[in-house]
Amino acid sequence: MKQQEEAEKRNHIKLGRELGIFMISDLVGKGLPIWLPKGNIIKEEIEKLVKEKEEKAGYIRVTTPHLGKKELYLKSGHLPYYKDSMYPEMEMDDGKYYLKAMNCPHHHLVYKHEIRSYRDLPLRIAEYGVCYRNELSGTLAGLLRVRMLAMNDAHIYCTKEQIENEFKNVIKLVQEYYEIFELRDYWFRLSKWDPKNKEKYINEPENWEYTENILRKVLKELDVKFFEVEDEAAFYGPKVDIQFKAVTGREETMSTIQLDFAAKERFDLTYQDKDGTENKDVFVIHRAPLSTHERFMAFLIEHFAGKFPVWLSPVQIRILSIADRNVRYARDVLKKLSIEGFRVELDDRNESISKKVKDAQLQNIPLTITIGDKEIENKTLAVRTLDGKMKYGMKISEFLKIIRDNLENKNVKFIL
């Protein structure tokens, strides 16, 4: 009963509506969320974090179209293996097109755009690519399961010798992301093929055995908690799924890392080896550490109960004036904080300070600054955190140092 009550309180659909994060309109259609201004800020902060970390990790970024010709998906194998999840084909004057359900076929073409040398590998191609999945209306659930999604996607093209190291680095990157958000209750699942299900998987038993053994070895060497399941792999290779327990108690897959042994044949992926010969043994690692914007946002809303860390909050600071005579100084503080780049707003309504504080708390604004006669006289601030901790007589310079440190370190908790 307690878990059910907590789940209802943290429900991302309820909180998303109350906090102005996203909306879903029947006129637009089910499974097609619209990001409202506050939700868009959170989404862009996550994307900024991802781009910074991936740039440091040696990823290059591309942008690819939202659709492609039928021939592209026949070549990739998404037709027929993934057809049920794709939207129906569109007849155009120059051929048949599909909305893309995956970014990988487009990224394979980016790889093939140039002659690659062994010196280029591993090549890490990243994109927040928008994809479309033909989900049944009955399976759609807020942001957790949608029909249009922005995926934190990348494909790593590497040699056989580089697979283990690259796969380990991806898992470590996932763990770094999770630590930033203080997500710690997760485990790994090695998802393998089912040899009996020949319609679902590419029938290459030797490649399946080889690649599954590599992933098992990586997980053991990293000493992480994992278990194995059959008939959960991608059609082109085994994968490692990272599982979480949601506040509802159900198990959810948050991130997926896949090892693809089929793309090299289908797309003729090659590189020039040290001796100048053409090497056709290119493996592809598909990875989406933070899943999709939609799924990850649903998880974060419920994980934080809508009370986001300061760095992620749409409004980081709200200034509250006690009386009309305090508004001028409050506006000066607003201007200083805005110039510093903080997301700050002023509540100068003719309401009691207790009402203003309560309204800020209902909107889960992490920091409020109260401005009264004493603060004006001493040129100080009275700062309150969302959990009720209060500090009076704080100089603006002191507050700026504390909040800068918090944002730089992306701390979940704000300590005055």
Image: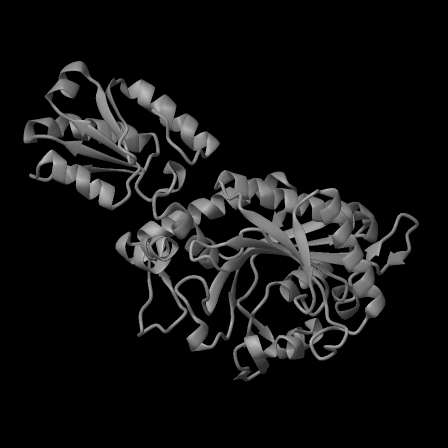
Q: Position of residue 1 (x, y in %)?
A: 36, 57
Image point (30%, 35%), residue name: 387
Image point (6%, 27%), residue name: 325
Q: Position of residue 167 (x, y in %)?
A: 71, 49
Q: Position of residue 188 (x, y in %)?
A: 63, 52
User: In the displayed structure, would residue 380 be above or below residue 309?
Assistant: above
User: In the displayed structure, would residue 114 be above or below residue 347?
Assistant: below
Image point (79%, 68%), residue name: 265
> In the image, is 373 to the left or to the right of 241?
left
> In the image, is 266 to the left or to the right of 255?
right
Colouring convention used in this rendered image of the protein? one colour
Q: Position of residue 139 (x, y in %)?
A: 45, 73
Q: Quadrant of residue 281?
A: bottom right
Residue furthest toward the front? 1
Quarter of the figure that contains the C terminus: top left
> In the image, is 223 to the left or to the right of 91?
right
Query: Can residue 121 be seen here?
Result: no
